[in-house]
Amino acid sequence: MSQDLAIEVRAALIRARKTQSWLAKQLGISSPYLSDILHGRRHSEEQVRNIKKILDIK
């Protein structure tokens, strides 16, 4: 995930008053796995699409 998109995800979580743990539960993945995606340590285009959909990011 690009750094810009990771920042956008964090901003969307703040606006929605949600946590990364909440997002991980919505995605059906662990919080550490989500953190790895956000930090670019893991690559999952499917999860990135799901993150964008859940947080309504274009």
Image (cartoon, rainbow, N blue to C red):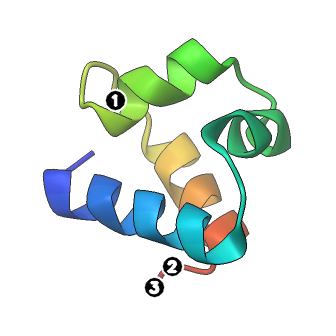
Check the picture and name the quadrant holding the N terminus.
top left
Residue type at mark 3: give it.
Answer: Lys
- When the figure is inspected, residue 32 is found, relative to residue 52, above or below; the finding is above
**Residue nearer the viewer, 8 or 52:** 8
Q: Where is residue 56 in the image (x, y as percent from the top left)?
A: 62, 80
Circle 3 — which element?
A: loop
Q: How crowded is mark 3: few (under 14 residues within 10 Å), some or many (20 or more)?
A: few
Q: In which quarter of the image is the C terminus?
A: bottom left
> Residue type at mark 1?
His
| Contact check, label 2 and label 3, Cβ < 8 Å | yes
Q: Position of residue 8 (x, y in %)?
A: 36, 68
**Looking at the picture, how far across and down is residue 22, in whole percent?**
78, 42
Q: Disc 2 versus disc 3: distance between alpha carbons? A: 4 Å
Q: Image check: 37 left or right of 52? A: left
Report the residue at 71% width, 66% height from top: 17
The residue that label 1 is drawn on is 43
Residue occupying image coordinates x 36% and y 38%? 38
Please give left or right for residue 25 compared with residue 9 in the image. Answer: right
- The numbered disc on residue 22 is none
Read off the residue under disc 2. 57
Whether the residues at callouts 3 and 1 have beta carbons within 8 Å, the answer is no
| Residue in the image at 82% along x and 45% along y | 26
Quarter of image, res 55: bottom right
Q: Identify the residue at image location x=64%, y=55%.
A: 50
Structural distance between the alpha carbons of marks 1 and 2: 18 Å
- What separation in Å lies between label 3 and label 1 (alpha carbons)? 19 Å
Q: Residue 58 carries which label?
A: 3
Residue 39, image quadrant: top left
State the residue lying farthest toward the bottom: 58
For label 2, the SS is: loop
Considering depth in this image, is 3 or 58 the residue closer to the camera?
Answer: 3
